[in-house]
Image (cartoon, rainbow, N blue to C red):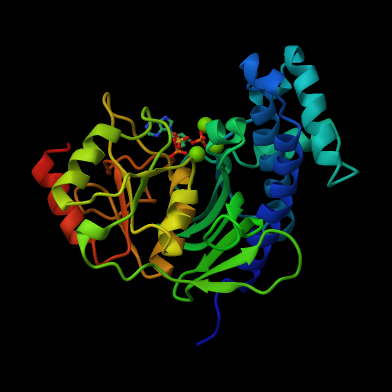
Amino acid sequence: MDRMFTAEHEVALAAVREAAVLCRNIQAAIGPDVLEKKDRSPVTVADFGSQALICRRLAEAFPDDPVMAEEDSAALREPAQAALLDRVVAEVRRLVPEATAEAVCAWIDRGNLTAYRPRFWTLDPIDGTKGFLRGDQYAIALALVVEGQVQVAALACPNLPLTPGADAPRGVVFTAVRGEGALAWPLEGEGEPVRVQVSATADPAQARFCESFESAHSAHDAAAEVARRLGITLPPRRLDSQAKYAMVARGEADLYLRLPTRPGYVEKVWDHAAGVLIVTEAGGRVTDIHGRPLRFDLGPTLAKNRGVVVSNGRLHAAVLEAIAAVGVA
Ligand SMILES: Nc1ncnc2c1ncn2[C@@H]1O[C@H](COP(=O)(O)OS(=O)(=O)O)[C@@H](OP(=O)(O)O)[C@H]1O
Ligand SMILES: [Mg+2]
Ligand SMILES: [Mg+2]
Ligand SMILES: [Mg+2]
């Protein structure tokens, strides 16, 4: 069979790698003063800069493809935000020296798709903004959706070790093309990729699960009840961003539970599209808490889904049953 989406895969990988350099430059400059002042501007600069770089590359390679991205430049164009815009342009220029303020805003605005299309890219320029500010995990997530199916994904995790374990150098990009498996690439350099595979854990009681760092994003108490019901004794691993999908994809965790909090939150497509393909291509399974597949054909939100359950596949049915028994709704 001919390989499909070869160009899309290559461009997506290069795009998230370039954006990761910008994000790393900015995160490296966050000092204690920023945290003390609760200054969110570094992540705002990185959000806009990352989106500009990625949309620029997509525009070059696939000028007709629309992009549904998290950020838009309206606020950045306001005269009161001139200093912020200057910072974004300065960061982008470290990678694209010819960038102007007008070009940066125009690139960001290429991410303005808000309605479903038969073919579109979806982008989270920084996923896990709180993790980014804490100096912790975050991701850059890009996916191509065709006819409602995620076909290509690239997920850069600049602070995740290249291989499981604390000693490995940090920085890994996960990519997948539908039907071709999932790969992990070093974030920097020319190193070869390795294939990633979910765990073989079959006993729910042995499951290692992960969840959001922030309890506002995922119900920790309900997850603890589900875990108890499954006989899980290990405490959850809490981390920000779609790095949680990566943990399941490479068998470092067996489960990722994202149980809805109250009042209800509707999940966004860019928070899941890349992660879903990477986990399924690594042999895992992703549904909502009711066992329904995530729907990427409804616009910017997963309007017909509730919560997210990610597993190595083998554990999926038992987890859905436990969630139903606990009465998460
Ligand atoms: N209430 C609520 N419930 C569920 N999800 C929410 C909620 N509020 C925000 N978000 C989205 O969560 C994205 C970050 O998810 P994480 O799993 O990284 O959360 S956490 O940062 O670990 O707490 C985060 O993505 P980013 O904005 O890209 O960081 C949000 O889109
Ligand atoms: Mg996000
Ligand atoms: Mg984001
Ligand atoms: Mg956000």
Q: Residue furthest right?
A: 98
Which residue is rendered at x = 43% and y = 62% of the image?
Answer: 249
Q: In front: 307, or 118?
A: 307
Question: Quarter-wise, where is residue 52 in the image?
Answer: top right
Residue drawn at 37 percent across, 38 percent down: 267
Residue 91 point in image, percent of width and height: 81, 36
Expressed as whole percent of the image width and height from the top left, the position of residue 17 reads 69, 55
**120 versus 97 height, above or below:** below
Above or below, comparing residue 60 to residue 216 in the picture: below
Q: In the picture, which quadrant includes the C terminus?
A: top left
**In this rendering, would 168 be left or right of 320?**
right
Q: Give x and y (percent) for residue 244.
A: 44, 50
Residue sitting at 33 percent across and 54 percent down?
Answer: 208
Q: Nearer the viewer, residue 156 or 277?
A: 156
Q: Is residue 169 visible?
A: yes
Residue 118 seen by the camera = no
